[in-house]
Image: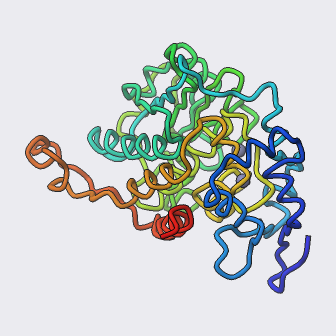
Amino acid sequence: MITSPRQMKVIQHSVETLTSALVSGRQDLAKLYSKYTKEERRLLEYGFHQGSPGSLFQPITVHSDSDWIPAHPEEPQDFESFYRDPYRKTPNASQNTIYIQTIGSFGETGVQTDEYVEWLREYCQAFFYGLSVKLLPVVSVAETRCSFRVNSNSHNLQILTGDLLQFLGNRKPKDAFCIVGITMIDLYPKDSWNFVFGQASLSMGMGVFSFARYDDNFYTRNYAGRLKKQLRLKQGDYSVFEGYYTPPITSTLLLRSCKTMTHEIGHMFGIKHCQWLNCVMQGSNHLEESDRRPLDFCPICLRKLQVSISFNIAERYKALLHWMEQDPSPAARPGGASACQSAPLFPKPTEAFHTSKLWLCRCLDILEKR
Ligand SMILES: [Zn+2]
Ligand SMILES: [Zn+2]
């Protein structure tokens, strides 16, 4: 590690370290790597020139001891150790669908919830290019029969992750590569814990994640999800969830949701936290660190995903760019304006994706020698 003038630590790996993390010294894996086109290899090796002007990939920076890497020392996972991991999961012809189960509402109306989770579905389908991503019908919190409580510090409603995982396990379709539960209600894993962003069982191919704390107001006094202190809850009476506060749908919330979903689904393939370069697979301990992560993979994690799904790298980037550029106005949708007259559509807020959009264009320039 070297210290930059701003006192943050920059994790700068040598070209040799990054080469062996990406390509591997094993002959068969080096041979597999040589099957990438010249342009693809050029893009992947941009990672070796991290931080130089115009570089597509930046080194990881550690801003404080509460960041993930100092707080959770982990063994770094290079491409070779990923490839050799007997527990990693690869989609196959009979299990190649990612299922998303929405629990409770996103936004103020059912239509808004449907619209929001459809944006997430489309984003995941572009990100895990080649797999199909399907939505299971939205369920209310009551339908999961989960335990719940009011957090004694933040006074917001929380639901128990273990119960939700059990619920998901019972609903997991046979062709599922994995099933991911998402909710805007805050989560807790056990009574003694304050909260958890999510919990997953990689061996069972399922996980549940909450976006409640991605609300800009969550940690402020004006957070509208706070309940009155004297409120008494009765287990089994889910009426308290009816009309309960959900964060406003903003571009930042959508960006954070997309990041969390893809990071967590990335783990389902056996991809561990990235310690090589700035990457969506970096661990994050708090919101500021999570916001610092880029939206996409570094070259090393990209290769891990690519061998798992066998997509064409340029095609995947094009699909992601298309999702960001899609005209959100109802009139631009084929049949959209007339078919949905009674149900107002909400435009997809993609402003927060602007930097990622430019980045994708630059990647495609390299891949297509534009
Ligand atoms: Zn993680
Ligand atoms: Zn990475």
- Name the residue rendered at 52%, 68% in the picture: 369
Rendered position, 244 above or below 12: above
Rendered position, 136 above or below 222: above
Could you say which is closer to the camera, residue 327 or residue 36? 36
Could you tell me if residue 63 is visible in this image? yes
**How many numbered circles are shown?**
0
Image coords of residue 191 (percent x, y): 71, 31
User: Horizontal placement of 328 versus 230: left or right?
Assistant: left
> Which residue is at the far bottom?
5
Q: Quadrant of the N terminus?
A: bottom right
Image coords of residue 120 (percent x, y): 43, 44
User: Horizontal placement of 303 versus 112: left or right?
Assistant: right
Rendered position, 209 above or below 43: above
- Name the residue rendered at 91%, 75% in the picture: 2
- Name the residue rendered at 60%, 50% in the picture: 154
Rendered position, 148 above or below 259: above
User: Horizontal placement of 303 versus 98: left or right?
Assistant: right
Image coords of residue 12 (percent x, y): 85, 69
Could you say which is closer to the camera, residue 292 or residue 191? 292
> Which corner quadrant of the image does residue 48 belong to?
bottom right
- Name the residue rendered at 37%, 25% in the picture: 137
Image coords of residue 58 (percent x, y): 71, 69
Could you say which is closer to the camera, residue 253 or residue 123? 123
Ligand 1: give its quadrant: top right
Could you tell me if residue 171 is visible in this image? no
> Which corner quadrant of the image does residue 267 belong to?
top right
